[in-house]
Structures are given as structure tokens and as C-alpha cells.
Image: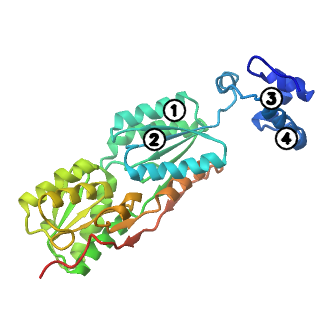
Amino acid sequence: MATFERAPRLQDVAEAAGVSLATASRALAGRDGVSPELAERIRQLAMTLGYVPNAHARALAGAAPPLVGLIVHDVADPYFAEVAKGVLQVADERQLMVLINQSERQPETELAHIRSLRAHRVGSIVLAGSGYVNTAEEAAAAAELLAFRAAGGRVALIGRHGIPVDAVLPDNEAGGSTAARHLFDLGHRRIAVVAGPANLSTVADRLGGVMDEVRAHGLDPGGLVVEHDAFSRDGGVAATRRVVAQHPETTAVLALTDVMALGALAVLRESGRDVPADTSVMGFDDVTVAADLAPALTTIRLPMVEMGAIALDLTLRPPAARPRRRRTGHELVVRDSTAPPRP
């Protein structure tokens, strides 16, 4: 077997296999026109020689690069980390490379990333994260995604229902109802909701489920304490501090995401309130760290890794006549952070 002082080229693989350059290229790209036996022999020779395809050259030659674009709101948020894990698992199985971007919940940043991914000639785009109550805020991104799909690209969304493409839809509204019901069943009536920005459809859906349960218990939804802030630990801190200062009679804090619940626990601890004896705390999502907190966090579990895997799988299937919608379930996970209120 020949050895090379320089990096092996495709021509070297072709010569070692005794085939044309075009045949070697088709075999390594997985295209038709080469028998399975010959293609496997060429791939084995390429591995032995240490040949690595030049992705830039392939793009210039017109070959579709095996790239997937993933846009999330915040890569530091455990929710999106688990969604990304699901996308990456499927990508590894299909030998795809994933380009990950974050929008920081800024519509203009999201639009810029979609355009950048199109410029990089990705084959599909997965957009994970809440849509907007005012659909005008995502109109430009929707138009860009639909144009990408019309040009042959594939698109799947996670957590959005306002754009007519394939989507994975978390059980947000029903989960909000289940969370509130758990607190009501424990005997809580002075509940404060710590929520993300009011313009996000995920917040509206989860809060809508909570309001449904408030009405089901004969209470006035207008009397429910709701504090909106950033969908982050710092947002949870700021919102819970307002709850403690303005509504000290609160016996339970329902955070509409686990990362906000982290902030709520910190504030209650620094204010001298015992959780759950003085104030119960509940989250939403069941991120990995939720079970390891002190106290362990009661929450609503969503199948986040599975959501990411399903979304990418949708983009790899033949297109359908109508947008495919995959709805998830949810599960109430009761841990140590909730208990009946003091008499």
C-alpha cells in the first residue's frame, strides 16, 4: 500500500482502487451508480489511506453537504441542551453535521441565523423555542423558512404552532393545568406564578393551562399573582423577589420553567423561608439538574431529548402534503419541593 508525505487525495483513492475519479467520488458520497461491493471496497481503501473528503471542495462542486442547522434560544439553558442532544443523536446515526446557533429570543437574530444557514447550504433546519403571541414578530422568519422549504430544504419546529411546517409541540397548556392542579390538591390557594416574557407563546400556553385550573376551582383568574421576567435563573430571582416583597402571604410559587425555579429557590432561601414548609416551589420541564437540587424540584416532565430527535427525523423524511404535527405528553414528577401549606 502506498504511503504519502502529503494528505491523501481522492485521486490516490481512485488509483488504489483501480477505478475512475468519478466512481471513487460517487462511492464516497453514497450516490447511485456504484455497486454496494465496490463502494464498500473504495470506502475501506479511503480509510486505510487516511483520506478525508474536502467538504468545501464538494460544496463548490455542487454536492449537497450533509449539514443540519439547529437554532435554539439559549445554549446555556438545560432545556435546549437536552433538545440539542436529541438532534445530535439522530445526526450521528445519519452521519450528519449539526451547525448550532442561538437567537437569545431576538426575532432579528433568529432571522439572521436562518439566512446564514441557508448560505451555508444546509439540507434542513430545526428551529427550537417558543414562538410569539404576536405572529408579526416571527413573520420574517416564517417567510424565510417557507422560502427555504420551497427551494427543497426541510424544516421542523419545536414549540411553535404558528408557522405551517412540520412541528413537535410540547404539552404546554395541559402541563400548566396539571401543575396548578397539584398545588391546589395540596391545599394551596395563595399561589404566585413566576413566568417568562408575556410575548412568548410558550408562556401564554402554560399560563393558559394554569388559568383553566384556577377557574375549575371556582377562583378568579384575575386575582392570580403573575410576575413576568426573563426566561432564566436571573429572571426567576427578580420575579420571586417581587413576589416576596409584594405578596408575602404566598404559600406556593409555580415557575413556568425549571431554570426560573432555580432562581425562586435561591430567593426563598436567602429570605429565610423554608421550602416546602413555608413556601412550596414547582417547576416545568424536568431538566437533568431538577432531581439533584436541595430540595429536589417537583416539576412537569417533557420528553426534551425525544422532541429533538423527532424534529430532525421529520426533516429527513419525504415531505408531506400537509404539515405534520407531533404532540408530546407530559408527566407530573412529585419530589421534595412541594407540600401542603401550614395550617
Q: Badge 4: few (under 14), some or many (20 or more) residues near its Cα, within 10 Å?
A: some
Q: Which residue was labeled with disc 2?
A: 71
Mark 2–mark 1 distance (CA, rounded to whole Å): 10 Å
Q: Which mark is residue 180?
A: none
**Left or right for 124, reference 144:** right
Give the quarter of the image for residue 5. Answer: top right
Kind of residue sitting beneath label 4: Glu
Q: Secondary structure at mark 4?
A: helix
Of the numbered discs in the image, which one, if any, rests on residue 40?
Answer: 4
Lower position in the chain sequence, tag 4 or tag 2: 4
**Residue at 34% of width from left, 46% of height from top?**
135
- Per the rendering, the mark at residue 49 is 3
Residue 122: x and y, percent? 58, 35
Give the residue at x 56% y 47%. Answer: 88
State the image coordinates of residue 44 (x, y, percent, origin top left): 83, 37
In the rendered picture of this protein, how many numbered marks are placed on residues?
4
